[in-house]
Image: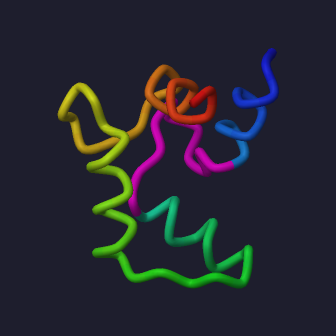
Amino acid sequence: MSDYAITFDLIDADNDGRISATELVRLMEVLGQPVTLEAAQEGVRRLDKDGDGLIDMEEFGAFIQK
């Protein structure tokens, strides 16, 4: 398993194989850098290449490897 896959699994709190804006909000709260749901939704939109409103492993990996 790659390093980014391990990170992805930590963020994917409900283990559905996708990262939602809500999961990003929770992550940022844990990191002490809270963001609004709207900001998290914008972040998801920027990484979401297939238009499903979520970040999958492939999209996450492409972002991390930049």
Q: Is residue 56 placed above or below 25 in the rendered structure?
A: above
Q: Main secondary structure of the magenta part?
A: loop
For the record, the magenta segment spans 11-21
Q: Is residue 34 placed above or below 25 in the rendered structure?
A: below
* Residue 38 relative to residue 31: left or right: left
- Which residue is at a point 35% across and 51% down the rendered structure image? 44
In which quadrant of the rendered view does residue 9 lie?
top right
The residue closer to the viewer here, 65 or 45, is 65
Question: Where is residue 30 shown, x and y percent of the image?
Answer: 72, 75
In which quadrant of the rendered view does residue 42 lie?
bottom left
Residue 17 inside the magenta-drawn segment? yes
Q: Is residue 14 placed above or below 31 in the rendered structure?
A: above
- Which residue is at a point 64% across and 82% down the rendered structure image? 33
- Which residue is at a point 78% across and 32% down the rendered structure image? 6
* Residue 65 relative to residue 3: left or right: left
Q: Could you tell me which quadrant the C terminus lies in? A: top right
Question: Where is residue 36 shown, x and y percent of the image?
Answer: 39, 82
* Residue 28 relative to residue 41: left or right: right
- Which residue is at a point 18% across and 34% down the rendered structure image? 51
Residue 59 inside the magenta-drawn segment? no
Farthest residue in the front direction? 66
